[in-house]
Image (cartoon, rainbow, N blue to C red):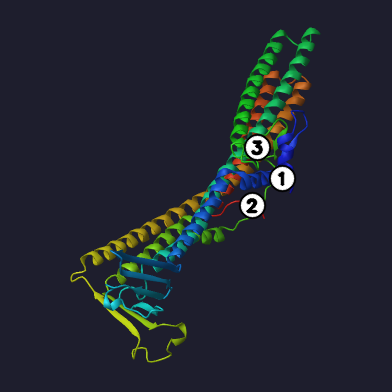
Amino acid sequence: MRLILSIITFLLISNSQAQELLTYEDYMLWVRDFHPVAKQADITLRFGEQELRASRGAFDPVVFMDVNAKRYNSTNYYDRREAGIKVPTWGGVELKGVGEQNRGVFLNPEETVPESGLLALGASVNIGQGLFIDRRRAALRQAQIYKDATQAERELILNDLYLDATETYWLWAADYNNLNVVQEGLRLAEMRFDMIKESYIQGDFPAIDTVEAYTQVMDRLYRFQQAEINFFQSTQMLNTFLWDGNEEPAELLGGVIPENVLEGFVFDYNKESLREYVASHPELQLTDFDIATLEVERRFRAEMLKPVLRVDYNFLTTTINEIPTNNFFVNDYKWGLTFSTPLFLRRERGNLGFTKARIDFKNYQRDLKFLQLRNKLETEIFNFETVEQQLVTFTNNVTGLQRLLDGEMKRFEIGESSLFLVNAREVSLFQAQQTLNELAAKRKTAYAKMLNAAGLGFDPE
């Protein structure tokens, strides 16, 4: 509810001077709930669900009916009718029930049945090829694996989206801080120019000082305009991540500002835990699912080396109440045995060997991917810790430059310094403050990159 209210506020805000804060958390929740890529990630789950549903269809009971009749020259040659149901099972046994009703002058004798019809209740069992796994069971198991893989694929898509969104937000925040720094510098230069111009009129400063003060105003005005361009560009980049509930692009209007990039941020992480997380990185999970799918294929291909040996048995009765409980091979039955096998099995052996080669290929690929991800994580950890050290160092530098400027201003006020030195101190301080803003944004982005390298993403909780 808070997110919805925030969105309404940001979308309806006027171009007045009132400012509304778009926090990093609200922004990320906005991205998570409305961005098209986030919705695409959710759709990947539907792919897995529908694939699993389709594969389960191979085990759906099948109802069938066959009517075949011939009448010629006022003679009923034959009228054959057959209907029934087949029920595939996970164990490879196919149960079936068939009803026949045949009549006609020229009916094949073996198709002769009682006038009321004949029922056949039985099963077909593979005791050779297909006993442990067949194409239907393999497809279902692979669909189950694919459904699990879509979870990892969704996580991978979202993690990359959150990283891009995070980097864009903190760039926007740094550009906003830099705009304020340059704006303050322009304000001070304009005030100093007005003061020196007034002092020149009163004869306290030479004319050349007014020229120098004016050039400083022009220089800082140019830098302010450039900072406005940078902030506008980063705002437009941020807008690409903002969509509303109607799946339409949304834009931040005037007055919406980011968090202060220099404010504290909770960096909750443990290096050893991150190193453990990388072992279950979504990219590795996807490779593992590929290997698992190939393992199912390998089992199926190995099963194809066996000969086809299928037994069919059907009990025959005119009424459902006459099904026997024993002595199935005494009377009223039909059964069959099917056997076949290629002599050389070259196709079957080739398919099995090809699948094994693909598994080996994927295993080597996984080993390389794990090494790459682990090294990338170590790089991002080092980068984050180094940026933290740089931020501490530069914070001290900014503090020192501020003291130098304060001292120079005091000397200028008592006539022991020059406008040139004051301007030089100010320029150094403003440049350092901008660098500090960029380092602060870089640190927060580096933190997100470190988590992303471990396979983690934005956690709104």
> What secondary structure is marked by label 1?
helix
Q: Which mark is residue 173?
A: 3
Pick out the residue farthest to the left: 343
List x then y, in percent, for residue 231.
Answer: 63, 30
Which residue is tagged 1?
4
Which residue is tagged 2?
267
Of labels 3 and 2, the one closer to you:
3
Residue 302 can be seen in this image: yes
Measured along the vertical axis of the image, is residue 383 above or below residue 436? below
Q: Are marks 3 and 1 in contact (CB under 8 Å)?
A: no
List x then y, in percent, for residue 212.
Answer: 67, 14
Determine the residue positioned at 58% across, 41% down. Answer: 167
> What secondary structure is marked by label 3?
helix
Q: Find the distance from the CA under tag 1 to the CA under tag 2.
A: 27 Å
What's the amino acid at mark 1? Ile
Q: Find the distance from the CA under tag 3 to the CA under tag 2.
A: 18 Å
> What secondary structure is marked by label 2?
loop
Q: Find the distance from the CA under tag 3 to the CA under tag 1.
A: 22 Å
Mark 1 crowd level (few <14, some 14–19, many ≥20, 10 Å Cα): some
Identify the mark nearer the N-term, 3 or 2: 3
